[in-house]
Amino acid sequence: METIEGADIYKPRGVFRKRGVTPVTGDMCEVSRGTGGDAGVIESICARKNELIRPCVSNIDGIAVVFAADTLNTALLDKYLIILESQKTSGYFEVFIIINKTDLANGGSLDKICSIYENAGYPVILTCCPNKSGFERLSAELRGKVTALAGPSGVGKSSITNILCGESVMKVGELSKKIQRGKHTTRHSEMFSLGCGGYIIDTPGFASLDFTGITCADLKTYFKEFARHEENCRFADCAHIGEPDCAVREQAGEQSDFGVSAARYKNYIVFYNELKERDNVG
């Protein structure tokens, strides 16, 4: 029995099913090799340093949220970031943002979005697959790490993976003529070795973006920039909604490196009210 990496087929022992344990992309496993064309067997799963449910990966150093510049919706982006931040309790990992298809973007609005999220604590890397701009910086960020790509379908995750790997390892979806968006082609998470050292995991778009397991009281902890100001709120348990002398609300709209963007704060209010209504109904 040995610990290996490879593209061969290995099937988990039935004991995993009985224990409710499922191998996921990123796992390091001890396996027995198959013989005579038979599939190998996963004997055990090594301890995970982290484990995510959405996307379903493990042992990552970082995760990049990928959006397309021409269809970027900040409310949807913030939902992705909240879902990822809420999963850091399983073990720490970095989160950064890739904005792809920059050739289709409005330069001024893109600069503003980059500023908002970099001030919130998320590095932003701009990429364009046709001319490969931004890939030198992206490769430097990924070097020697295990990084997953997450984001909606049609934003170019598979195209980014192909460029980073130097070959067509992932199928790229054609454009849907009806809705002018990329068709979803990635149906499972898959890991690939990078020429620059490290690994990348291409993942499917989330099936849903509901805040399962997140309460309205939890929500503020997933907006990282709030922590800079919370100690100046009058109340220690301030929800940053309607309380008097709320330092977070007072900072909203400031454009300094330590402010809270009006757009992010507006999304926070919308999400908070949605969660409060859900929790009260439940």
Image: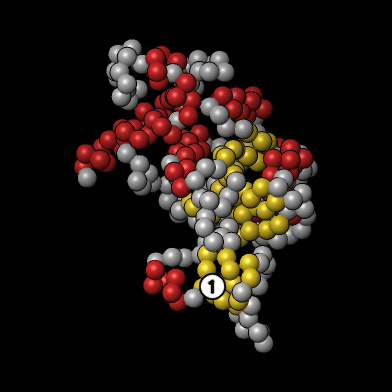
Label 1 residue SS:
strand
Direction from residue 217 to residue 231 in the image, left or right = right
Q: Residue at left 44%, top 18%? A: 229
Q: Residue furthest bottom?
A: 36
Residue placed furthest toward the left: 281
In percent of the image, x 39 and y 30: which residue is there?
Answer: 220
**Amino acid marked by disc 1:** Glu
Query: x, y (%) of residue 175?
Result: 62, 53
Q: Quadrant of the N terminus?
A: bottom right
At 74% from the left and 37% from the top, the residue drawn is: 137
Image coords of residue 38 (percent x, y):
62, 84
Task: Mark yes or no: residue 65 visible.
Answer: no
- Outermost residue toward the front? 1
Image height check: is 135 above or below 146? above
> 274 or 107: which is nearer to us?
274
The image quadrant of residue 2 is: bottom right
Please determine whether, in this image, residue 156 is positioned above or below residue 19.
Answer: above
Quick one: label 1, few (<14), some, or many (20+) residues within 10 Å?
A: many
Tell me which corner region of the image, top left, top right, bottom left or bottom right, holds residue 249: top left
Which quarter of the image is occupied by the C terminus?
top left
Asked if 220 appears above or below 136 in the picture, the reply is above
Q: Which residue is mark 1?
A: 43
**Where residue 56 sits in the image (x, y, percent)?**
50, 56
Rendered location of residue 269, percent (x, y): 36, 28
Of residues 238 and 111, the one drawn nearer to the viewer in this rendering: 238
Question: Is residue 282 rendered to the left or right of residue 14?
Answer: left
Q: Is residue 198 left or right of residue 186?
A: right
